[in-house]
Amino acid sequence: MNHDRIEGRWKQIKGKVKEQWGRLTDDDLEVIAGRRDQLLGRIQQRHGIAREEAEREVRRFERDHPDTLA
């Protein structure tokens, strides 16, 4: 996955991100702005999980939504 794709398509995918990680706020989504490292950090913070688990979840999200991230 090219991480630039997340940034470039952020407006299109942030709704799906919010569905996946419901504890993320609209303010979180604005701060994240498609940056994968910010997404990982906010998922960790809001969902109380380890970085490794957040990484697995984001990889799974990327794999499950190839049409959105292409």
Image: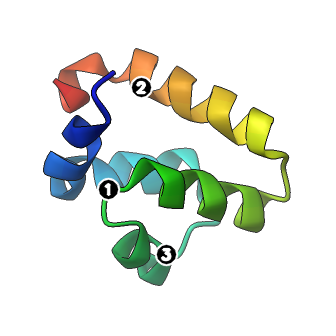
| Sequence-wise first label, 2 or 1 | 1
Provide residue 38's location: percent of width, then percent of height: 50, 61
Q: Label 1: state its secondary structure.
A: loop
Q: Which residue is mark 3?
A: 28
Provide residue 39's location: percent of width, then percent of height: 51, 55
Q: Amino acid at mark 2?
A: Glu
Q: Which mark is residue 62?
A: 2
Q: Label 3: state its secondary structure.
A: helix
| Residue sitting at x 52%, y 76% | 25
Residue 2 shown left or right of residue 62 in the figure? left
Residue 14 shown left or right of residue 9 in the figure? right
| Residue sitting at x 49%, y 75% | 28
Q: Amino acid at mark 3?
A: Asp
Q: Residues within 10 Å of mark 1 (few under 14, many from 20)?
A: many
| Sequence-wise first label, 2 or 3 | 3
Q: Residues within 10 Å of mark 2 (few under 14, many from 20)?
A: some
The C terminus - image quarter = top left
User: Label 3 to label 1, Cα distance in Å?
Assistant: 11 Å
Q: Which mark is residue 34?
A: 1
The N terminus - image quarter = top left
In this view, the residue farthest toward the bottom is 27
